[in-house]
Image (cartoon, rainbow, N blue to C red):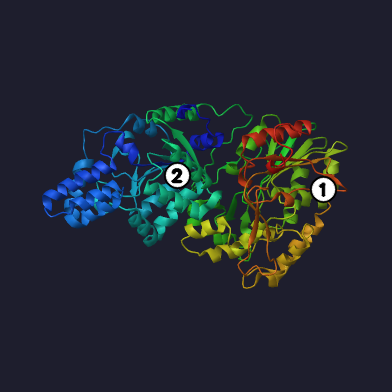
Amino acid sequence: MKLVDQTLDPFFIAQVRNRRCVLFAGAGLSAGAGFPSWVQLVQGVAQAARQQVPDLKTAGLDALVAKGELPEVAAYLRGTMGVDAFHAALSARLQQQDVAPSALHQLIARFQFRAIVTTNFDPLIERASGGLLPVATQVDAKDLARYLAEDTPFVFKVHGDIARPETIILTSDEFARAMVDNKVLKSAFNALLLTSPLLFVGYSHSDKDFDLFLRENVQVFGHEGARRYALMQALDERDTILQDLLKEKSVTVLPYAQHAEVPAFFERLLQTTQAPAGKVTRKLPRAALPGSLQNDRVVPARASTARARPGARLAVVIPGMLGSQLAVREKSGEDKSIWLNVLRLVMGAMSELDMTAPHARRVSAPRMLAQFSEPLVNALAAGREVLPFPYDWRLDYRQNAARLSEFLERECANGTHCDLVAINEGGLLARAFLADYRGDWRRLHGDRGGRVVMLGTAHHGTFQAVLTLLGEDSLTKALGKIDLKHRREDIRRVFASFPSLYQMLPSPRLNAAWRALYERKSWGACEVSAELLADGLKFQEEIAEAIDPDRMVAVLGDGQSTVVSVDNPERLDQHPQWAMTSEGDGTVAHPCARLEKGGRTVPTYYAPVDHGTLGTDAAVARAVVDILDRGTTTLLATAPQVAR
């Protein structure tokens, strides 16, 4: 199949359309325009070196070039020739004014990528953009941070710019050292990787720069980082094996046979992303938040402030943990966004979410974040009115249940057909509401009742909460990497102050041995709250009977490697061993997500997606609409993959 004919991921298209995607451009992009390839460039500089240094070890250099050790050869030539002579030889081959940007460069310039990250020294990308894109190199950390803060598209030359010889980096080791020595650079770079899907072009499977970027991204963010795509030429069976290995690192390889297929791919992508997104009742706009990186794009509240009319169809969407914007009220009265504003997180703002801090009560949740729910909201809005219910996901779910009761009383008239659609941990909030305010729910619906659809909810807890309290989850590690002021342990303590996290611990109702998870001594030297542990167990008991097989439906992610148990819950500080299963969504194992009452099981469907994608997957969104309309669906499987 040709590259242009391959099916594009709708989520990826939406991210490109919304200017969220980061393009990584390798040497293949410049070579296609007529600039020398890495091999030709190094050989050309070596030829200049031979004229300057007659006794140059030619045979040894040729052998290293043949082995592909090109950056190392270039670094050797720089040391042998001297910095000035080396840069002069390099510039003579890269600053050719008669080399015009290729058709692919011109196509790329028509996109609005969030950033173009390149290992190329040459100016072709800037020429293709007409000089409109600002440029930052690895020594321009402050400029990089400013472009991120202002959401300005820019070119990031991670190996330097040929116009500025002092910025040139030749080897991956030199770049890695720059990342270690300059914490501002590393934090800003990781912030970019944390929030944006990545598209690689001009790299090969064996490219050391590609391997470095990928290794850094996967080590920091694991499988929960932004999605990664790579256009790569597939030549033989070995490449197919490498593609499979990359897939294990969450890289989707889009293979092609001929280089001519790449411009056609970008042409099609350009046409697709410039086309209308599809007819929906309410299109979600980009948020305009002062000083924001636009990471916290938000779902607007209902346009009308009037209550829903009697008989109207209404869907209240409850996001999961992390799914609501969190802001701190300034003395000026302005709300300062903390979550998910990556620049502020880089500057240490995560500490402002600490529940033990004096300003904890000043935190509000003004809007629901679009990146965790936009496709679902748009699908629902095509046939009903949608009311997002943002909430402070740090708090006790019972507190938020009380707010939900007030919200429904205020927004919904008697006779309104109201359904609850809960994403991830939002299902715990929904069940807390049903446990404490069932009378309100019945009065709202009369005899008809409304449906409660829950996507990936950890009804019996999740070991992800255990990992977070231990500081061993990917999010805590990632935040620790990008935060300039705090260590990972500081971030862990912030999370450990959230009552909601303790209410998500695995329930002993499912496994009696897990009662130890609620005992302070089981955590050893790890600082957790004994009071919140006890309350978390109490919460699990209180919502145990809040189950309605007639009105509830569960949709679970499937086929993802998920922690399902721990070897010794009484000694969590002693290098615990985690039992894994493919029956889960990467965060919640199926046994912890299924519900039953009185021998009756809540209807459950399965989708081959991970926990974080359940609110953004188009197929899941269509199935949720189907369930609300008909009470059932044929769009999803009724059994996990292993049972089929």
Provide the secondary structure element on which disc 2 rests.
Answer: loop
Label 2 neighbour load within 10 Å: few <14, some 14-19, many 20+: some
x 58%, y 61%: residue: 472
Residue at image mark 1: 596
Marks 1 and 2, the one that precedes in the sequence = 2
Residue 526: x and y, percent?
Answer: 62, 70
Residue 540 drawn above or below residue 298: below
Q: Looking at the image, is 557 positioned above or below residue 139?
A: above
From the viewer's perspective, tell me whether residue 51 is left or right of residue 623.
Answer: left
The kind of residue tagged 1 is Glu
Horizontal arrangement in the rendering, residue 216 relative to residue 493 (left or right): left
Mark 1 Cα within 10 Å, few/some/many (few <14, many 20+)? some
Q: Residue at x 62, y 73 (%)?
A: 525
C-alpha span from label 1 to label 2? 47 Å
Figure check: 371 above or below 576: above
Q: Nearer the viewer, residue 359 or 68?
A: 68
Q: Which quadrant holds residue 316?
A: top right
Between 521 and 492, the one lying in front of the other is 521
Q: Of the residues shown, which amino acid type is indicated by label 2?
A: Asp
Q: Of circles 1 and 2, which is in front? A: 1
Tell me the residue that label 2 is attached to: 151
Q: In this rendered view, identify the residue nearer to me: 179 or 336.
A: 179
Q: Position of residue 89 (x, y in %)?
A: 18, 47
Q: Residue at x 11, y 49 (%)?
A: 51
